[in-house]
Image: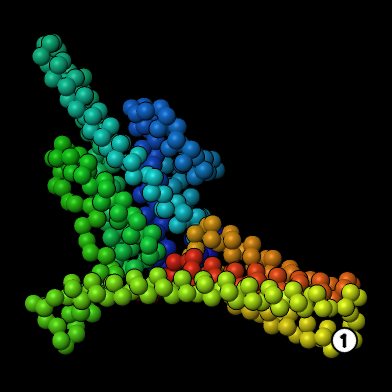
Amino acid sequence: MNGHQRNREYPSNRHEIKLLEAIAKSFLILDRVVLKTLKYKGDPAGAERFEKLTKGYFDRIENDPLKELRFKLRVDRFVSELKLNDLLDLMSRPERTTYYRDTIYLRLNACYNAQDEEEYHLASSSDEPPLGVEEHAKKGLRAIVEEMYNLDERVRRADDKNYAGEKILQLKTMLGKIDGVLERACEYLGHEYKPLANWNSTINQQTITISAKSPNNSLTSNPPAAASGHTKITSVVAFFVPSFYMAFFVLACMAASIFAYMAAFNAEAIPGRATDSDFYQLIASTILQSLGIGTSIWPIINDLRPTRYLLLKCWIYTGLSVFLTIAAVPLYVLVPVSWSGISNFVGTCMLSFVQLELMLGISHYKPHTD
């Protein structure tokens, strides 16, 4: 699925997808610099670990049919062809943080070494020092700093728009951890230093805005306290509601299992007939349950963005639910009717698991229009 196809599938999120693609491009450019730095200036074991982390997508970029294109253009092509979940997965790699910090330190060290080399050459020889040694080292460091600020700007814009929810907040946290070493790099290069992740997240801004608009509040009142109280209430509700639902889910499944066992135990050990009223009732319930399955997974197809692991679980549960629900119909007339009931019951349980994953395991977000 390329970028144009995604835009047609998610027309209200066209700008969001473009911004997420830009963030992914920054990561790929930085990852390439990190890999080169670790290979030639860092720890071989660290370079090997990072190469394994990035091998999947770098192999695809290097194997681009248009190999004569510059690396950044091949990155553009690669990112535009990513599926939405792969795009988000590429952004969600918190282990990058340590490698990024180490790379900036290594590049800084290369600059200092180049500076020392030039100074030593001037002190020990009347000849001119090799041209561009320090400048070449600065060029590599400068490229990292510029791309870091590009990434910071794109993450800030995504956060302002509330795009990709918690993933953007994770990226903001990552940038905050890199900020200290980036300040040293800017100091060495003589660039103006601008702190990374130096903005208020959208959630905090919305809370403060609501407090400011309240007729009982003024600019001199205490919105942080109000926001804190609101956050505490939200946290309590967010903890107890899923916990209550989980307990209810377990009890309901246990109760249903007891009645399902009793039904299977008391059923006649003979196949049913296609003329039985129970058979027609089974067909009707199968049709409605299939409709329920489609309704349950529609959010995944339409707009929700679960992690790859949760998406895989949801589709496995959905496939089992569809198979077992439909299989209950022919089983009714082919084997003892108890097996048909068991198949239908397990299929319903699988559907309940899908709904539970959708409720507790997926980070929701709101689609945006500009």
The residue shown at (22%, 41%) is: 181
Q: Is residue 225 visible?
A: yes
Identify the image's colour scheme: rainbow, by chain, secondary structure or one colour: rainbow
The residue shown at (14%, 83%) is: 217
Q: What number of labels is visible?
A: 1
Residue 185 appears left or right of 17: left
Q: Residue furthest top?
A: 125
Relative depth, front residue between 165 and 272: 272
The residue shown at (18%, 72%) is: 224
Q: Position of residue 266 (x, y in %)?
A: 82, 78
Q: Amino acid at mark 1?
A: Asp
Could you say which quadrant of the image residue 323 lies in?
bottom right
Quadrant in which the C terminus appears: bottom left
Residue 333 appears left or right of 349: right
Q: Tag 1: Cα neighbours inside 10 Å, few (<14), some, or many (≥20)?
A: few
Depicted 301 relative to depicted 167: above or below:
below
Relative depth, front residue between 130 and 318: 318
Q: Position of residue 154 (x, y in %)?
A: 31, 57
SS for dot 1: loop
Relative depth, front residue between 296 and 15: 296
Q: Position of residue 260 (x, y in %)?
A: 73, 76
Depicted 258 relative to depicted 276: above or below:
above
The residue at which mark 1 appears reads as 276
The residue shown at (46%, 71%) is: 243
Q: Position of residue 275 (x, y in %)?
A: 90, 86
Depicted 255 relative to depicted 312: above or below:
below
Residue 275 appears left or right of 105: right
Q: Is residue 150 visible?
A: no
